[in-house]
Image: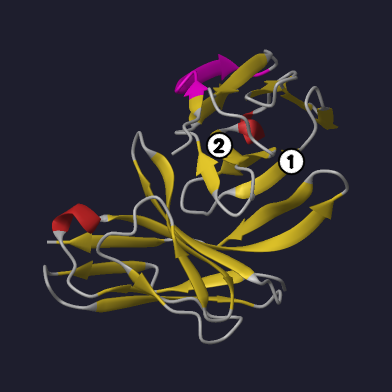
Amino acid sequence: EAQVTQNPRYLITVTGKKLTVTCSQNMNHEYMSWYRQDPGLGLRQIYYSMNVEVTDKGDVPEGYKVSRKEKRNFPLILESPSPNQTSLYFCASSLHRPTPGQGVTYEQYFGPGTRLTVT
Amino acid sequence: TQLLEQSPQFLSIQEGENLTVYCNSSSVFSSLQWYRQEPGEGPVLLVTVVTGGEVKKLKRLTFQFGDARKDSSLHITAAQPGDTGLYLCAGAGGSARQLTFGSGTQLTVLP
């Protein structure tokens, strides 16, 4: 079954304790991305990756790191979590769909989410 | 940063009614997508529109991309309780590498 998996699904931690949220996709997608979702703010992109070893900052990258050593995996790292990083996190992977005359569109498949609480 | 505003933020209607959700921006997007998200799950793609003025239909859902590619609408005909969920629009910039999401419309369809 084609899917994006995230682990853990729920995590409660304390300020300053490093953590990693894993993300894996089995669709051979080149593009992967991390978002956080907060009430009233919608989904905001943290980082994205166009391919292995290629990562770029999204709209809210501060306090996060990512790596893309393999095509299927895109872990999100919080070196020193703070309470303002309490949120619902989603990983997504995208199919590149060339559209004649329109360039490329990225139709994203999302994981089930990781609810993180930092106390 | 490109911004997308969705309206209304919340919508509660009776089964069988029609509704329209709007997604507006001052920026031009190369394409626009609509997603639906249910509690405890990630968003699921419903449709992608890429051409100004484009209209796409998905059963009782009709999606339209504005002529200037700055806005979009989602119209649901004869809503059903199964349509309940958070509807999100997302616009792609020129390079299409980044998606900007609207804040969402929470739709509740009452039986």
Quarter of the image where the N terminus of chain B is located? top left
Residue farthest toward the right in the current orientation of the protein? A100
Q: Is residue B11 magenta?
A: yes
- From the viewer's perspective, tell me whether residue B63 is left or right of residue A58: right
Q: Which residue is mark 2?
A: B88
Q: Which residue is mark 1?
A: B47
On screen, residue B76 above or below A50? above
Tag 2's secondary structure? strand
Quarter of the image where the C terminus of chain B is located? top right
From the top left corner, tell me how far across and down residue B49 is, in percent: 76, 36
Residue drawn at x 66%, y 40% as measured from the top left: B33
Please name the amino acid that badge 2 sits on.
Leu
| Gap in angstroms between the C-alphas marked 2 and 1 | 11 Å
In terms of image quadrants, where is residue A117?
bottom left
Q: Callout 1: 10 Å neighbours few (<14), some, many (20+)? A: some
Q: Callout 2: 10 Å neighbours few (<14), some, many (20+)? A: many
From the top left corner, tell me how far across and down residue A52 is, in percent: 58, 80
Q: Do residues under tags 2 and 1 come within 8 Å of each other at their CB atoms? A: no
Tag 1's secondary structure? strand
Residue drawn at x 22%, y 67% as measured from the top left: A12
Q: Which residues are magenta?
A: B6-15
Residue drawn at x 51%, y 42% as measured from the top left: B100
